[in-house]
Amino acid sequence: MSETPRFSRVLIANRGEIALRIQRACRQLGLETVAVYSEADADSRHVQEADVALCIGPAAAARSYLDADGLLLAARLTGAQAIHPGYGFLSENADFADAVEAAGLTFIGPTGASIRMMGDKITAKRAMRDAGVPCVPGSDGPLPADMDAVKAIALQVGFPVIVKASGGGGGRGMRVVEREADLAQAVALTAKEAQQAFGNPTLYLERFMQKPRHVEIQVLCDTHGTALWLGARDCSLQRRHQKVLEEASAPGIAPQTIAEIGERCAEACRRIGYRGAGTFEFLYEDGVFAFIEMNTRVQVEHPITEETTGIDIVAGQLRIAQGDPLGVAQADIPLLGHSIECRLNAEDPFTFMPSPGTITRWDLPGGPGIRVDTHVVAGYTVQPYYDSLIGKIISHGATRAEAIARMQVALAEMKVEGVSTNIALHRDLLADPDFRRGGVDIHYLERWLAQRTAP
């Protein structure tokens, strides 16, 4: 293996709370940071605290945070030797990762080849099957053009099935089919949608699981052959395929079962030469794990894994990119207590309409077992151009009950004025009896919201 170049200055190709989170990890390791920002984010906290800051364009993400050429130019102008993409934007763009490396810089993440492999759901499932990771029953490869052959596959898998785009994600490019008579139309519509959204009409088919949970395994892999799994997260509370609340570990699943799946994920990473942080996402139903996709980046919910393992995932990404070994063995990683994350969004808690504007009051909670990851301060203006996430409250306790109790106190202490937030939604969820029992499925929140009435 060729020696990985060392770097001392990192360009953070992102904004908001994750940009500040990366900046703090860099400073902890003695690395200088370059903040790039759109005109709308000129007053952001990570911009103010960076060693170097550079405006890269107007508010529109396509002309700033998604401008790959502009980001590479910014790195050259500021002397950055490495780029951390955070999450969202270009974080899972294989072409961008390749361009960073081709420019002689270090991409703080997997190789472009790994991103490309795991970004194609068909290729990813094939790699996972080869490594012994259980997958959702479905087609072995792309759906054939012949509809009779497609129907034969669906009948073998068993209805209901779900037709998915190979390059899809975020809940787009998928369609549930309850009966054979509807299959042809579903395939045609999904292919058209996939072509328009992802530039790739390739489809595959899986059995549609009725009431699964969404459980994920975090991994961290260095370039010296060490691949670690860092426990499990339950992310089943979702609205329109977007996570609302997450917890670690997944309640009600035996630690030995989690360990067996974790080891298979780590082995898969060793087989494909994966480096950096990543997350294996599974559907879990009736005691069975079924792989659906891998996210090749740090995730919004990474703090709950940090709280339950003591591993700084972002600092780990930086050390791995420097070529350093992780320096810890699987047996040395504890799984301590329970942690919950509530995503705070500037939105109406009942209509979910975004609520841009200036925050006039911002009182943060505190106390044992409470962490708040945010870039917001009083006087901060929530922009209408980007995701509405304004922070994350993370609780940790010796038990799940203690983590819930601490989160309830934190949510009661949190005071925000000037914009609407979803704090009330989280308060109601934490009081819900089914959530408190643990193990709700991925459709639960949608059903719950349909029955909820505004005050």
Image (spheres, helix red, strand yellow):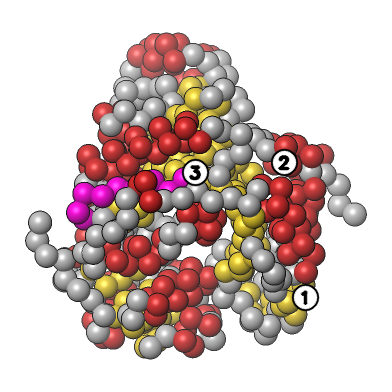
Figure check: 3 above or below 30: above
Q: Which residue is mark 2?
A: 435
Q: Residues within 10 Å of mark 3 (few under 14, many from 20)?
A: many
Residue 454 at x, y = what percent? 86, 52
Residue 31 at x, y = what percent? 32, 80
Front residue of this view, candidates 128 and 307: 307
Q: Residue furthest front?
A: 332
Q: Residues within 10 Å of mark 2 (few under 14, many from 20)?
A: some
Residue for point 56% across, 22% down: 286
Question: Does residue 286 appear anywhere in the picture?
Answer: yes
Q: Which mark is nearer the camera, 3 or 1?
A: 3
Three-letter residue code for mark 1: Glu
Question: Does residue 241 appear anywhere in the picture?
Answer: no
* Quadrant of image for the N terminus: bottom left
Front residue of this view, candidates 280 and 156: 280
Q: Secondary structure at mark 1?
A: strand
Front residue of this view, candidates 94 and 271: 271
Q: Hey, which quadrant is residue 452 in on the image?
A: top right
Q: Which mark is nearer the camera, 1 or 2?
A: 2
Q: Which residue is mark 1?
A: 417
